Amino acid sequence: MSLPTVQFAGQSVGKIATGLMRLTWAPKQTPDEQAFELMRVAIKEGATFFNSGVFYGNPPDSTSNLQLISRFCEAHPDLKDKFVLSVKGGITAEFAPNGTIEFLREEVEKINRILKHRKMDMYEVARLDTKTGIETVMKNLLTLRDEGHFKYISLSEVAAATIRKAASVGPVSCVEVEYSPFTTDIERNGVLDACKELNIPIAAYSPLGAGFLGNSWKSKEDIPEGDHRRHFDKFSDEHFEHNMQLVKQLEEIAKKRDVTAAQLTIAWVGQQWEGVLPLPGTTNPDRAKQNIAAGKIRLSDDELKQIRAVIDNFDVKGVRYAKGRMSENLFA
């Protein structure tokens, strides 16, 4: 059985997207041989929407993810046009949103210069520049699109009203937001409904709860040193053990279906709407293959109801990120 497809960014891509962030934005960068194998597996299995970011690297070399993609394209020229590449940007080195035409033009030129062997297909603003305003940001993005720097526009961490305003100015090809059993905010804040209404696909990042599912962590101390998730509130000593109870409940359902809890969860996220593309990230090619296989799982109505009951009756503890950090412009 082949991976189901979705009309995405003007063409057909696999129902599971491929997150590249952890290949470079991690305590240790994944060796090229391993990273290239993961990317080859994704292309072969049909998970052809690749998600990158201009800042997905450890300082001072924050562009290491783009450099990795460039090396992959150089090593595999036959595969360089076999995937749709989205690159997240639009924020400064201090992680402040900047949607001015001058900043965006300089950044998209830099991105394509680093990629060297191909251009990005999609440019995604990571956070909304509220000073510039979404209407002006969209006009700037349309100008840069028309100049040929990229083909498609994506938004990340935006509110329903912002999505509608943006779409009234020009075509929005994707909205990237967090969506998992641990974070179902988009079901309540109108984002999911807005994307359904406007038929804008959703790239659902962290479908495995930023690592709660898919890892064998027993405590916060199991998270690798230097991993920014050590600072996430949900993984704090105060909340870790409580939140792991949700994992255990999902594991029980997964056992009955003879799949992993991670696969069950990815399948569940993808079935919440046909336009949702789960966006898991891993550094392990075998794990990537398992994640992609989850896109072929079709949960029954009874299974969906059972999973929904578990999620709706579980009170996840902790805010999405670290307390007091990265909160500005979330869902702006």
Image: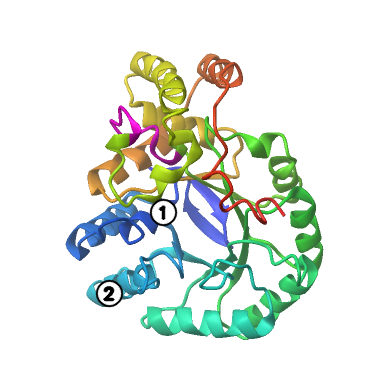
Q: Quadrant of residue 208?
A: top left
Q: Is residue 239 left or right of residue 217?
A: right
Q: Is residue 185 above or below residue 300?
A: below
Residue extent of the magenta highlight: 210-220
Q: Position of residue 77 (x, y in %)?
A: 28, 75
219 inside magenta stretch = yes
Name the colouring of the figure.
Answer: rainbow
Which kind of residue does numbered mark 2 sit on?
Arg
State the separation of the CA atoms marked 1 and 2.
17 Å
Which is the main secondary structure of the residues drawn in magenta?
loop
Q: Is residue 69 left or right of residue 111?
A: left
Q: Is residue 251 above or below residue 27?
A: above
In the picture, the quarter occupied by the C terminus is bottom right
* Circle on res. 71: 2
Q: Position of residue 262 (x, y in %)?
A: 38, 32
Element on which disc 2 rests: helix
Residue drawn at the location 34% of the way across and 50% of the way down: 227
Q: How many marks?
A: 2
Element on which disc 1 rests: strand
Residue position marked by numbered label 1 in the rendering: 19
Q: Position of residue 241 (x, y in %)?
A: 41, 23
Which kind of residue does numbered mark 1 sit on?
Gly
